[in-house]
């Protein structure tokens, strides 16, 4: 029983010594607001559009031409 008591006291002192020696550091969070000014570069209208938009316009133009041709064939008859 004496060994258990001594072992318990040693473990208690060890635990207290490790926990009491810790330094608590508090971290401060600094929030900064930054405004970024961007200059609008003189981009051509075509570069502002995405690749899908440009491809869609090309296909749309070709389809419209084909539709116009078919309508002209129908009107000629």
Image (cartoon, rainbow, N blue to C red):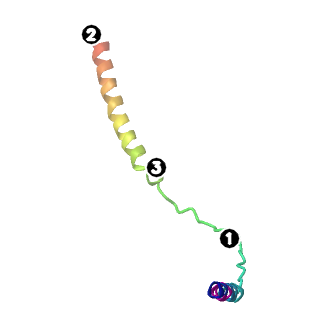
Q: Which residues are magenta?
A: 6-11
Q: Label 3 belongs to which residue?
A: 49
Query: How many numbered tags mark residues here?
Result: 3
Task: Label 1: state its secondary structure.
Answer: loop
Q: Position of residue 50 (x, y in %)?
A: 44, 50
Mark drawn on residue 67: none
Q: In terms of sequence position, does the residue under pointer 3 or pointer 2 come before the other?
A: 3
Q: CA distance from mark 3 to mark 2?
A: 41 Å
Q: Is residue 58 left or right of residue 39?
A: left
User: Magenta includes 25?
Assistant: no
Task: Label 3: state its secondary structure.
Answer: loop
Label 1 or label 3, whichever lies nearer to me, is 1
Q: Label 2 belongs to which residue?
A: 77
Label 3 or label 2, whichever lies nearer to me, is 3
Please identify the quarter of the rendering in which residue 71 is found: top left
Q: In terms of sequence position, does the residue under pointer 1 or pointer 3 come before the other?
A: 1
Residue at left offset 53%, top offset 63%: 41
- Mark 1 and mark 3 in contact? Answer it, CB < 8 Å: no
Q: Position of residue 9 (x, y in %)?
A: 68, 87
């Amino acid at each position: 029983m004496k060994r258990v008591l001594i072992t318990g006291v040693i473990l208690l002192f060890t635990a207290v010594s490790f926990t009491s020696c810790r330094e608590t550091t508090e971290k401060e969070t600094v929030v900064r607001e930054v405004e970024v000014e961007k200059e609008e570069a003189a981009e051509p209208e075509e570069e502002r559009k995405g690749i899908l938009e440009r491809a869609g316009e090309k296909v749309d133009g070709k389809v419209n031409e084909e539709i116009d041709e078919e309508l002209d064939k129908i009107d000629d008859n």
